[in-house]
Amino acid sequence: MEEKKPLSEQEKVIEINGLYKSFGNYHVLRGVDLELYKRENLVVLGKSGTGKSVLIKIVVGLLTPDLGEVKVLNQHVDQITYKELLALRLKVGFSFQNSALYDSMTVRENLVFPLVRNQRKLTKGEITSSVEEMLDAVGLLHTINQMPSELSGGQRKRIGIARTLILRPEIMLYDEPTAGLDPITCLEINSLINEVQERFHTSSIIITHDLTCAKAVGNRVAMLLDGKFERQGTFDEVFNTNDERVKPFYDYNFIQ
């Protein structure tokens, strides 16, 4: 499988400089520097407990850094008002690992809920059109009246992505998008992430342990090691090393 090609550097949509975050004596992030460029898929790799989820929570303002600068769409996340933060979050879509669907709602209702909550002036026709467009984009229009319990894990993952996309975010954050899925479904989700990038012109951060996913979707890969992004580049650039912190990760995870 060929690695995905990097994009030429252009406008930055996320800029992180000198970021530190600790919890008591546990120092999670120790001077993180990272950029996400417009329309880029950036894969963030790292062992469990290395701070990947902490980083994402800081990006959306759910956690405050101890030190450092975080800019999202040219706004300093820790310096804006709460109202401005809420408006910014509407431009940043989060695809949860467990899909986070409401079990008591149909697929249609799951997509309608965030839409009418945040865009109150839409007509019924506009709502129906948006829901059907997003379900068609993930290949699951036929499930519109089904309940989440009737769907497979891969289908729930796709519906979760559709529900996130319905607000047309500029940035997508994927948390372990292929976790718990069979190999064939993993390949389908990888293809979907690439399709979302192309069709909706999103910029994305993909947190994953799945190196097949990383190679397939990442224009660029960043590996979090000892609280910093010490290796960044294409997939092959990151793993072309004898660094003992990196090689076992490749040997354990990646299947040619």
Image (tube, grey):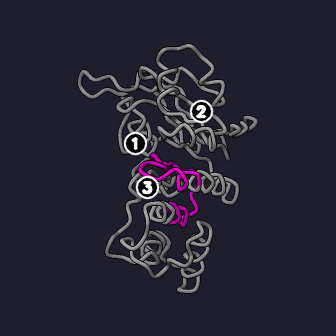
Point out the image quarter for the N terminus: top right
Looking at the image, which residue sits at the far right?
8
Mark 2–mark 3 Cα distance, whole angstroms, equals: 29 Å
Q: What residue sits right under mark 2 in the picture? A: 221
Q: Which of pointers 2 and 3 indicates the residue nearer the eye?
A: 2
**35 to 197, vertically: above or below:** above
Asked whether the residues under the numbered discs 1 and 3 touch, taking CB atoms below 8 Å apart as contact, a structural biologist would say no
Q: What residue sits right under mark 1 in the picture? A: 57
The residue under the point 49% across, 33% down is: 253
Q: Earlier in the sequence, mark 2 or mark 3?
A: 3
Magenta stretch holds residue 174: yes
Q: Residues within 10 Å of mark 2 (few under 14, many from 20)?
A: many
Judged left or right of residue 43, residue 227 is: left
**138 to 195, vertically: above or below:** below
Q: Amino acid at mark 3?
A: Leu
Residue 86 numbered tag: 3
x then y, percent, for residue 189: 56, 55
Residue 97 or residue 188, whichever sits in front: 188
